[in-house]
Amino acid sequence: MHRLQNKTSIVTGGAHGIGRAISELYAEEGSIVLIVDIDSAAGNEVANSISKVGGRAEFCHADVASPKDTAQAVKSITDKHGRVDILCANAAYLVPWHDVLSATEQEWERCLRVALKGTDNYTREVLPWMVKARRGSIIIVASIQGLVACPASTAYTFVKTGLIGYSRSVAYDYGEFNVRVNALCPGPIQTRISPKPGELGHDLGIKRTLLRRFGQPREVAQAAVFLGSEESSYVTGSCLVVDGGWTAM
């Protein structure tokens, strides 16, 4: 079943990890996917791998923090297809995090520019197309760190909390145009930069989840498909948590 058949999608930070899984599954479900990332080699590899199995995907090198790059990326899909049905704002700045006394100005600045301002840049560009069509789904990848406390990650936690508030505010303002906006909040997910088995962060993730394991990127992607599809046509302003039960404890 192709739940996103012939929809057009933009996935920011789509070259790695959760973003890559979302790009791949969107294509499997029938969507035309524009993968946006600053890693050209990885982004092109994802787009090519999708195309080789019959999917429709293109890569666009763009810095989400740049309004100019953002406008060009959105234009590249609207010029060809005349619409944007789904925006998945996934890009974030991921570094070794610090507590409030240790976080550097660079850490704060990059977290704010990439996650918060980057999401706003893409939302501003796609909203006029969605309002005109009177339909659209914006999925903002936040985190359980926007809902519960986690150690030594002040700047990252700040922006993820802000993204949840941002998604609710935009959902409020544009619901009358049938534009749905939801936050997707992953818990511990195993990606290339996640702590490895035996490391402290990995063991903590196992202990804190009811399912006693890390999630896989595709498990988050499945939730992103739901939010992008007509199956969630009455879901907006919500936080969909995919965390193995972390926030239930």
Image (cartoon, rainbow, N blue to C red):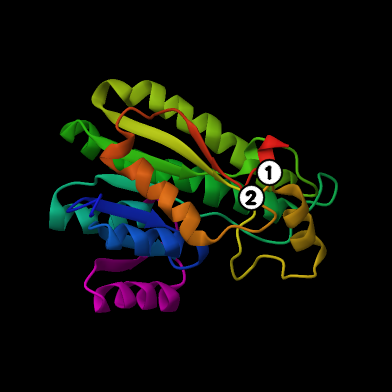
Q: Is residue 170 visible?
A: yes
Q: Secondary structure at mark 2?
A: helix
Asked whether 241 or 68 is in front, the reply is 241
Q: Earlier in the sequence, mark 1 or mark 2?
A: 2
Q: Secondary structure at mark 1?
A: helix
Residue 109's disc is 2
Q: Is residue 65 visible?
A: no
Asked whether 189 or 86 is in front, the reply is 189
| Residue 122 shown in magenta | no
Q: Amino acid at mark 1?
A: Trp
**Residue at (62%, 36%) from the top-left corner?**
161
Give me the C-alpha separation between circle 1 and circle 2: 29 Å
Q: Which residue is mark 1?
A: 246
Indicate left or right for 247 with 129 as reference: right
Quarter of the image where one finds residue 14: bottom left
Residue stretch rendered in magenta on the structure:
38-67
